[in-house]
Every structure is written in C-alpha cells, then in structure tokens.
Amino acid sequence: MKKIIHTLYIIAFAISCSGDQSLTTSDLIKAKDLNGLKTQKEQKLKILNAMKAELNQINNAISDLDPSEKLALISIFEVKPENFDHHIEIQANIKTRQNVLLYPEYTGTLKKIYVEEGQEVKKGKLLAQIEDAGLKNQLEQLQIQTALSKTTYERTQRLWDQNIGAEMQLLQAKAAYESQLKTMAQLKKQLQRTQILAPFSGVIDEIIANTGANLLPGQTPVLRIVNLKKMYTEASVPERYLSQIKKGTTAIVKIPMLSREYPTTVRQIGNFINPNNRSFRVETPLPNPDEMIKPNLTCKLKINDYSNPEALMIPLRIIKENAVGKKYIFKLNPAGKDQVYRTEQTFIQLGKNSIDKVEVIVGIQSGDLLVDEGATIVENNQRVKNIQ
C-alpha cells in the first residue's frame, strides 16, 4: 500500500512540475493560446498513460498474490467446427399445372353430366355429353353407304383383275369408297367433340354448367378438374443470387398456414431477368401426399445458397463492436488454477449468419475458448473466472 501511495505521489509531482509553470491552464484559456493548450494536453496525457500502465502493473501483481481476489464471473464458449447451411428466404406461390377449366369444343345443349363434385376420375373418363344435333344418325347412314361402296369397289376390282369391265368404273368405285371413308372420319371427330373427357386423372373440383345449358366453344365453362398430387412452387429471386443458385440446389418450402416444412430441390431456373424487379424465376417440386396443400397458397421458399461442413460458428451475442465499427470478441488464456483466465481482445472477420450464430472467417480457430456470458462487462487483459 505504501508503494502505491509513493508511486501516485511521484506521478502527481511530475504532473505539477510539467509544462510551463509561468502559465497555468486558466491563463492559457484566458489568453486563448491554442498551441499552448495542445502542448499542455499532450504532456498530461503522456503522464496519465504512464500512470495507467503503472496501475495496471500494480493490479496484476495484486491479482496474482491475493487469494481472495474478486474476479468477474463468465461462462465459456468453445469453438468447434460444425456444419452450416445458409438459406435465402423468398416469398413464393404454390401452383399446379393440372388445374383446368374444361370448355366445350362443340356448340350445343349440355345433355348430361356423368360426374359429381369431389369425385375422383381417371384420365379419359367421360365427364359430360353435348347434344350431337343428329350427327350420330348421319354417321350411321354414312356407315351403311360406306359398306355398300366398299362392296362395289371390291367387286369391280375382282372383275378388273379378270380383265372384265372398264378402268373408269374401277376408279369411280375406288374414289367413292375413299371419299366416304374420309367423310365418316370427319363425322367421328365431330362426335368426339360432343364429349367432354378428363384430360388427366384428378378430382372434379367444381361443376359450373347445368344440364340443358347452351354451350359455346371456348366461352362457356362446364367444370373444373384439379390434380393436387403434382404441385410446385414458383418464386422470383433477386438477380444478385443468380450465380449461387443452380438446378438441383437444395431448398425448403415453409407453409405458415399449415405449419409445415417440406424438403425439395430447384427443378428449373428461368433464363430471363424481369426488368421491372430485376429477378429471375425459380421452380421447385412440392410433394403433397395427403393433398392438404392447395393451389395459390402462399409459402416461403428457403434456398440453400452457401454450405460449409467445417464452419466456425459463434453466438451473435458475444460479438462486440468498437468505435470504428470493427467486430471483436474476447479469447480466454489460462491465468492460474481454478478456472481462472485472462481475456484477450481479438478482432474477427464475419461471414454469413443464421438466426443466432455467425460464421467467423478470420480471427479464431477450432479449440479456442471465448467469453460467452459476461462478454458485455469484461475488458481486455482482465482476469476472469469460469462458472461451470
């Protein structure tokens, strides 16, 4: 204690003897002597820094010799490599390409609907029938005439093979038969247009038209069929991520309304940058085994844009920042027994972060011990104690 008082006395005496004693600080301020004030400030700062260094030596010596020293209590975070996957999160929409309104291809009256709403149907199933306006009768008559033309042609051909009859008769019989075949094929196509068939397997979501309604091709919707098994998500991703996202990149679809997440991969990347929002299209398949997911649901698409299986991750809460914006943490170096350490201020360079951790690129290595709890109250070169 006497040594401390003696040291402080010497420093105080040095301060009192420093500078120009003919002019006091008050005199310099009154005289507005800027250079004199700056000189006096530099001298006193040097003496003050020397005093601080001396006090630090004294405190360290006391800390080493005093068994009853009260140390700041901290907890330790040990740096260990871990797998780190970083994701970008984009708003997306859920869609299906098998969500279709079926329109008639033939003008006429809706004769009958063979399905009900909510019914599952297979591809090609007859869903509805339109009045054919006598097309079926015309086809039956034409089939009879075509059969006769076929018989006439075949007999004429046999006679011609026996050198009986004129060549013109053979050609006329052949032309009549082939013409009726083409006419019959056209009528069959027209009759097929009076039927509305399921374009794919799915569920009848809605029946819009009523039996007896007059239908116009491409204008009067009849029913809607939906297949919920082949869903996908579509998102517009900012162009700055173009080099980081590839076909096959892993992703996660998060649906807040259902409180569900589904793993997936990028299936398609657009080749066009939208000039309005500087983004490109990304598509991912979406499994829907229980058909709970519906088209046009909003979701969040989390795309993996960075992975490091040996990342050095530390909690965000232990990172501090100095006056110029540089980030630092406190490493711990052994300073005695009983879990006593000395802090070491270490500046770090950060990479990408997760919710509560961030990757450190430069500044630490595996096995380093860092101050965890208590990081906000400790200082550089301070003795601390770990509370296990």
Image (cartoon, rainbow, N blue to C red):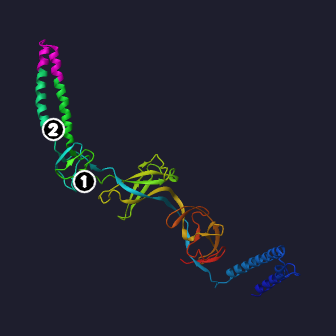
Q: Quadrant of residue 36?
A: bottom right
Q: Along the horizontal axis of the image, is 242 left or right of 368? A: left
Q: Along the horizontal axis of the image, is 55 left or right of 265? A: right
Residue at far top of view: 163
Q: Position of residue 73 (x, y in %)?
A: 58, 79
Against 319, residue 22 (above or below) is below
What residue is at 67 percent from the left and 74 percent from the top? 381
Residue type at mark 1? Val
Against 300, residue 214 (above or below) is above
- Main SS of the magenta part reads helix
Query: Secondary structure under badge 2?
Result: helix
Q: How crowded is mark 2: few (under 14 residues within 10 Å), some or many (20 or more)?
A: some
Whole-Å distance between the Cαs marked 2 and 1? 31 Å
Q: Quadrant of residue 92?
A: bottom left
Q: Give the range drawn in magenta.
A: 155-175
Q: From the viewer's side, name the closer residue of 163 and 11.
A: 163
Tell whether position 161 is magenta. Answer: yes
What label does residue 203 carry, if any? Answer: 1
Against 352, residue 64 (above or below) is below
Residue at far right of view: 22
Against 77, residue 310 (above or below) is above
Quadrant that contains the N terminus: bottom right
What label does residue 221 carry, if any? Answer: none
Residue type at mark 2? Leu
Name the residue that disc number 2 marks: 135
Tell whether position 26 is magenta. Answer: no
What residue is at 47 percent from the left and 56 percent from the top? 304
Q: How crowded is mark 1: few (under 14 residues within 10 Å), some or many (20 or more)?
A: many
